[in-house]
Every structure is written in structure tokens, then in C-alpha cells.
Image (cartoon, rainbow, N blue to C red):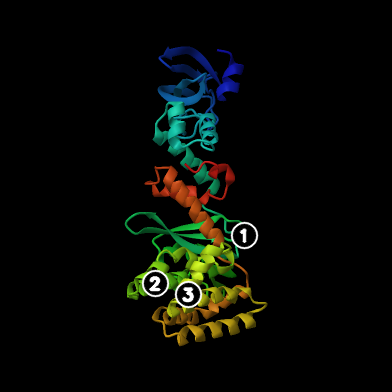
Amino acid sequence: MNSSFLYHAWGLYNHKCTREEYKGNTIILHIEAKERKKECPKCGHRQLVKNGFRVRDFIGLPIGGKKVIIRMKVQRYKCKNQDCDYDRQESIPFATGSCGYTHRFAKYVVDLLRSMTLKDAANLLGVSWDTVKDIHTRHLEYHYAPPSLEGVDSIGIDEFAVRKGHVYKTIVVDLKSGRILYVGNGKGADALDGFWKRIRRKGVGIKYIATDLSAAFISSVYENCPNAVHVFDHFHVVKLMNEKLDEIRRVQYHMEKDINKRKVLKGTRYLLLSNGADIFDKEYKTRLDNALDMNKPLSQAYYLKEQLREIWMQVNKDDAERGMTDWVKQARESKVPQLVKMATTVTAHRTGILAWYDCHISTGKVEGINNKIKVMKRTAYGFRDERYFELRLYALHDCRITRNVG
């Protein structure tokens, strides 16, 4: 076979093809080195002799839908110089270590995975699913792990469920670039221990941190990064208020004895949890007003929910603090247990809530990444391998990888 063709098709530039073999849908190319070694690579003496050989198979780039196997006679050499202990196989420039595929085949697989799932690529190439995953794992290890912490000063922390049964992982995201910097097991404070160790080892100065109201995250940040501005994500605060409002709706519905009033309350959950400014339909607006007019606790909770959003709409931090104080006072004076509890929560976290005026950050970017992770889990399997799953997370910000999340 022409040497130029061997080079351009499979990258074999120091080898010759001794014969071709055809078995079914597979082409087998028998190759060996063009020239034998004459000098010892270690001592330089010309006393190098052949000392046996072994035959190794490598998966090469396919041709016309046919699988190509490169079967190489790998020669072993030994130095006859008594002062030299050289006794090794010749190097294989087109493959790495014990891998059973060529560099060009690995690159082709990675290119395919930008628009295919692991299973699709394996079926197309006629190789095992594990081979494709091994190639992708090596590629991700080389390019994305461990993530660089250079220039990182703003981070967001959140957890997500890996699978049913309360199995969680915690991620740390660079809020500027959107890269996942760390993946920890669980959702407790200890899930972040590895990240803080790396931060201290690299001497990285974290200035701003955004989290939800998780007690574990709060204690971990306070212990390991006490000088950073810790912002409690306002969407989580509003979400917590929405949960209290929904709880009040359910309690009031079950307490109501009048059948007609129960009919009015039934089905109002969506209207109550929507932003008041977003309800343009007159029929829906009338239905909401009727439900609020006939139930005082529900009305108090709804209007306090609307007022809570205004804490993040003030001109400055002082105005926001006055607004928060007034909101807490109204919630406590309502005597509604759920609102009183919410007032206590807001008071306990007032510093972190108002810190939003020191740096306008949130966990919104982290939530967006969590949505990508959910899609990834739904469209792919193979994430039983925790290391591979972690590597895919590190590469999630790269559109060349995430174009196909399966």
C-alpha cells in the first residue's frame, strides 16, 4: 500500500503495510516499522538486537462504512552492551500507551460526540459503548480537569438531585464565566470542603458569594470565607414566600365551610403566585379580587408577597432596609402563623438579603446550569460513572461540548 496514503488516512508515516486482509465488514491492515532500530536509545551503542515481538490491534479511521483494524507487529529490542539494561518495545507514535485505538480515531470520536450520543457513535463506528466513553473521558480529563481558578472572585453555590432517593451533588460556579469550578457529594457543609482546600492552596481571593438560604451553605461560607460579601439569592427568598402563600391558601380552603366560597378559592393557586402586574386578563383579575376580598389572611399574604419584591427595587440600600423593616412589621402584625414565620426568616437573613445592594449577583446563572444538567440526565445514560459525570459537568459551559448533551 502507498506510504503517502497510509500517512494521510491514518497518520502512519514511519510504517509500511505488509498486507491487507478483509473479514466481513472489517479491513485489517498488517503494518510494521519501515526500518529497524540500530542504535540503543539509552547508551548510544550500535549493539541493539531484536528480542521478540508482539502483535497489537488498533482501531483506525473507518473507510466507506467499513471498520479498519491496524494490526502492528511491535518489535522488542535489547541492548547487548553489558553496562546497559535497555530492553523495551519500540514506540508507537500513532497511539497512546495501552489504548486500542489511534489518535486520529479518538479525535474523530470526539468530533462525532458534538452531534451524537455515546450510543449513536458506538453503533455508527461498530465499537463498544465503553470504548467511546473511554475516549471521551480522556479528552475531558485533558481539556477540562481540574478547572482553573485563575481570576475567580465571584461564585455561586447550589445543589441538585442526581437521582431519586435523596442523592445530591453540590456545584460551585464562576458567576462571570459560567464555568463549574467544583462538584461535591451531598448538600451539606462538608460537600464544599474540597473546594475550600483548593482555594486556600491556590491562594484565590473570593470577594462575592451567592447562595440560597441553606443553613449548610451559610455556615460553610462563614467558616471558610468570612470576609466575602455573602448574598442570599432574592429568587429563593420570593420562592419561600410563595410557598408560605400557597400553604395559607390550602389552610383557608380546608377551613372554609361555605361551598360557594370554596369554589371561589379553588383553582386560584396560579393567580396568587403570579406577579400581579402580569395578570392582564380581566376575567382572571376579577376572580383573584373576589378570592382576596372574601378571605383576609389570604389577602394579607398576597399583598405582602407583592411588597416583598420591592425590597430589591429601591434606589439604595438604606431605602431597602427601611422597606424590609416595614414589611416585617406588617407580617408580624397580621398574626398569620405562616407570615410571622416568614418575617422571622427575613429578619434572620437581613444582612445577606441587603448585601444584594453591595454587589448585584444572584444564583440565576447556577439555576440555568442546573436546568442543563436536568436535560443531560434525561437524554443520556452512563452517568453511573461518577468521574465521567463530573467531567461532563466541567465541560458544560463549552458550547462545542454541550451542543449535544446526550
Q: In this view of the protein, which residue sits in the foreground, 338 or 23? A: 338
- Which label's residue is closer to the chain start, 3 or 2? 2
* SS assignment at label 2: helix
Would you name the residue on which mark 2 appears? 261
For the point 54% across and 26% down, the residue is 39
Identify the disc placed on residue 292.
Answer: 3
For the point 55% across and 85% down, the residue is 326
On screen, 333 above or below 369?
below
Across and down, in percent, residue 65 comes to 49, 20
On screen, 190 above or below 86?
below
Identify the disc placed on residue 326.
Answer: none
Q: Residue 170: which quarter of the image?
A: bottom left
What whole-number distance in Å separates the C-alpha atoms at marks 3 and 2? Answer: 11 Å
The three-letter code of the residue at mark 1 reads: Lys
Residue 236 visible to the viewer: no
Across and down, in percent, residue 271 comes to 49, 65
On screen, 244 above or below 149?
below
Q: Nearer the viewer, mark 3 or mark 2?
A: 2
- Which label's residue is closer to the chain start, 2 or 1? 1
Q: In this view of the protein, which residue sits in the foreground, 33 or 308? A: 308
Q: In this view of the protein, which residue sits in the foreground, 110 or 178? A: 178
The residue most toward the front is: 260
Across and down, in percent, residue 102 comes to 50, 29
Would you name the residue on which mark 1 appears? 176
The three-letter code of the residue at mark 2 reads: Lys
**How many C-alpha atoms fall within 10 Å of the one at disc 3: few (<14), some, or many (≥20)?**
many
Q: In this view of the protein, which residue sits in the foreground, 377 or 171? A: 377
What whole-number distance in Å separates the C-alpha atoms at marks 2 and 1? Answer: 50 Å
* SS assignment at label 1: loop
For the point 36% across and 71% down, the residue is 253
